[in-house]
Amino acid sequence: MLAATLGLGLVIGLSLGALGGGGSILTVPALVYVIGQDARAATTSSLFIVGITSVIAALGHARSGRVRWGIGIVFGVTGIAAGFAGTAVNRLVDPDVLLLAFAAVIVVAAVGMLLNSRHEEEPAPQEGDAPQPARRWTAGRVGRIAGAGLLVGFMTGFFGVGGGFVIVPALTLALGLSMPQAVATSLVVISINSAGALLARAGTAHFDWAVIVPFTLAAVAGSLGGKMVADRVSGTTLTRAFAVLLLAVAVYTGTSSLISLLG
């Protein structure tokens, strides 16, 4: 069991460090189907594991000057209240229904990653092309960022995931951050959202430290390796490979939940 915990932690940390998200969405299925935790305990464990790992990974990216701290903090704080709401709803939902909904979210995440990877392949503007307008803090853009922050915060509380697969597109499309900046800044947002959702569960959640501690240590080590991968491997290649993995996890999680609900 320890070997499985360490191996899963390394894989999830690697994804967080390389993609700024995605790895967190695998944590809950890994804890449920491999480690054996129930859905609610897994969402709580996931918040701690992903939160700590994201902090360490964000600091690694910060040393490269990629983190936009102001944007990340505003985005993250916006979602804290929604995280409390998501946690409240989590307590009311049947665990199998929770996992089935989670599988649907994984599919959406995978499709979004694949679509985003197509945009990454578009050729760079040639000399003489019209320059892209600078992104500014207009009311509409602030509204979109606030809306995305609320959505991510709710998902963090409800599913126990950081929502990096939503944050990264929001940062690139709404604020015009480059992909490396969006990946790095999303880790700040994930850290804040995870902390807020954990605070909402204070006094009611059970923490299985025998699983959480080694899983978190392995994930932190993986996140440092993920940054090295992000520096050397094409983002498009990483995104597509991970999207395929997400789809496989979604099929397994959804099928298992349906069998349990219908059985």
Image: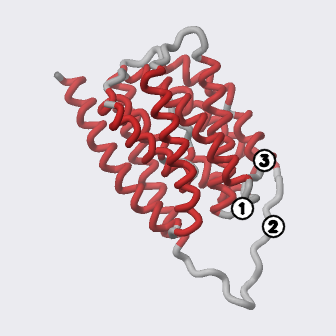
Q: How far apart are marks 3 and 2 (CA)?
A: 19 Å
**On screen, 250 above or below 101?**
below
Q: Check disc 2 and report the residue beneath it.
A: 134
Q: Where is residue 173 in the image (x, y as percent from the top left)?
A: 65, 59
The quadrant holding residue 155 is: top right
Q: Residues within 10 Å of mark 2 (few under 14, many from 20)?
A: few
Give amino acid for label 1. Answer: Gly
Q: Check disc 3 and report the residue beneath it.
A: 69
Q: Which of 28 and 11 is in front in this view?
A: 11
- For the point 81% across and 46% down, the residue is 70
- For the point 65% across and 35% down, the residue is 150
- For the point 74% across and 90% down, the residue is 128
Q: Distance between the residues labelled 3 and 1?
A: 15 Å
- For the point 29% across and 37% down, the residue is 254
Q: Check disc 1 and report the residue beneath it.
A: 176
Q: Is residue 26 left or right of residue 184?
A: left
Evaluate if marks 3 and 2 touch, with contact meaning CB atoms under 8 Å apart. Answer: no
Q: Distance between the residues labelled 1 and 2?
A: 8 Å
Q: Position of residue 234 (x, y in %)?
A: 51, 70
Q: Position of residue 124 (x, y in %)?
A: 63, 80
Residue reaching furthest bottom?
Answer: 128
